[in-house]
Amino acid sequence: MKISIAMAAYKGERFLREQLDSIARQTLLPYELVITDDSPDSGTADIALDFAHRVPFPVRVVRNAERLGFHANFFKAISLCDGDFVAFCDQDDVWADNKLERVAREFADPEVMLVVHGVKVVNGELDERDDNTASHWSYRGVHDPLTTNPWYVLFGMSTVVRRAIYDYIDWRERPEHPIDPGFPMSHDTWAWFVATSLGKISAIDDALVLYRQHGANSCGVAPDRDVGAKVKMSKAAGATHYRRMANAAFGRADKMRDVSRDAPLPVRERAAAAARYYRALGERLGRRAGLYGAATSTVRRACTVARLLVSGAYRPLDHGGLGHRALLKDVHATVFRVSIE
């Protein structure tokens, strides 16, 4: 099985050697390791090139002429991979020795497009942190297309994908990131979107990475929120937020309509279904945005909630709905005339 590893590096001297050594210990060696280096100096590249001389698999180190930024750098690394599968790799973690071997078993099913696994959250010295694992992972087992939360944010370094999903749909023009207004979708968010649209995903319990949090991560573990904090966040979301989410959904629908004609027929059929799914989701979110406008009357709000309810719009997120909590919030906003821009 040809599994490429894609690593986007930037000033990685502090922890890079440990990560590279854990890759060298894999019970199933990678087909190749591709490192795109965004660093202003050669320190990171020097470590990687030294590593390349000591391992029995190809290591390609590409130094960027100018800084691309974290997400663009990761997309570049992925685009340079030649394997049938791509494992996303951060520069500062430590992999379990059997990570690639364990993940490879899940791809025996040709319909599985993406595999994710558990992680163990550790500090800079690799000591386990109190906010470890369970609350940061929501899925177990194999899931069919369009049966997971479309807005789910996964840990990129816990992800391995079929390389083909980057060929089926052009990733260079991407819709807006669902939680980063003004920025296009990141490499891992894109992978989740395309993989969950075009095939199955497999989520395994095994903690196959020590996910190091050291204070200088490009991305990291969000702090656990209690119920009060989650309610506060939900209350803050209003017309602007839901319009933005609607536009993101419409953007995804448009991308699914642009699936390559060279893609297998089942993939093209699933892309068409995903386009309809995201178009419908965008319409629901758009109607919901109108509900929270200050100029929207109580009668109009009530009619909007009723239409959404009858149409099944409040079914669970995993089935393309807004969720039951959205119904409670919308009813409250209607009864008490709550307006949130």
Image: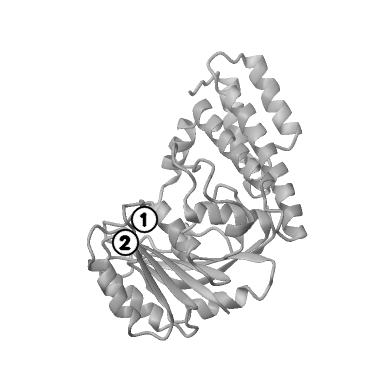
Q: For the residue carrying disc 1, how many other residues have a C-alpha within 10 Å: few (<14), some (14-19), or many (20+)?
A: some
The total of numbered circles placed on residues is 2
Q: Residue at x 55, y 77 (%)?
A: 2
Residue 220 is marked as: 1
Task: Indicate which disc, 1 or 2, sits on the residue closer to the N terminus.
Answer: 2
Q: For the residue carrying disc 2, how many other residues have a C-alpha within 10 Å: few (<14), some (14-19), or many (20+)?
A: some
Q: Is residue 107 above or below residue 192?
A: below
C-alpha span from label 1 to label 2:
7 Å
Secondary structure of the residue carrying numbered label 2 = loop
Q: Quadrant of residue 251?
A: top right
Secondary structure of the residue carrying numbered label 1 = loop
Front-most of 330 and 286? 286
Asked if the residues shown at circle 1 and circle 2 are in contact, with their CB atoms under 8 angstroms apart, the answer is: yes
Q: Residue at x 32, y 79 (%)?
A: 51
Residue 174 is marked as: none
Amino acid, disc 2: Gln
Q: Give residue 307's position: percent from left, percent from top.
A: 73, 27
Amino acid, disc 1: Gly
- Whether residue 190 is visible to the viewer of this picture, yes or no, is yes
- Whether residue 13 is visible to the viewer of this picture, yes or no, is no
Residue 213 is marked as: 2
Q: Quadrant of residue 203?
A: bottom right
Q: Residue at x 48, y 43 (%)?
A: 184
Front-most of 216 and 77? 77
Q: Is residue 119 above or below residue 236?
A: below
Q: Give residue 336's position: percent from left, percent from top.
A: 55, 20
Left or right, 135 with reference to 45: right
Q: Quadrant location of the N terminus? A: bottom right
Q: Residue at x 64, y 20 (%)?
A: 301
Q: Give residue 18's position: percent from left, percent from top.
A: 30, 75
Left or right, 89 with reference to 329: left
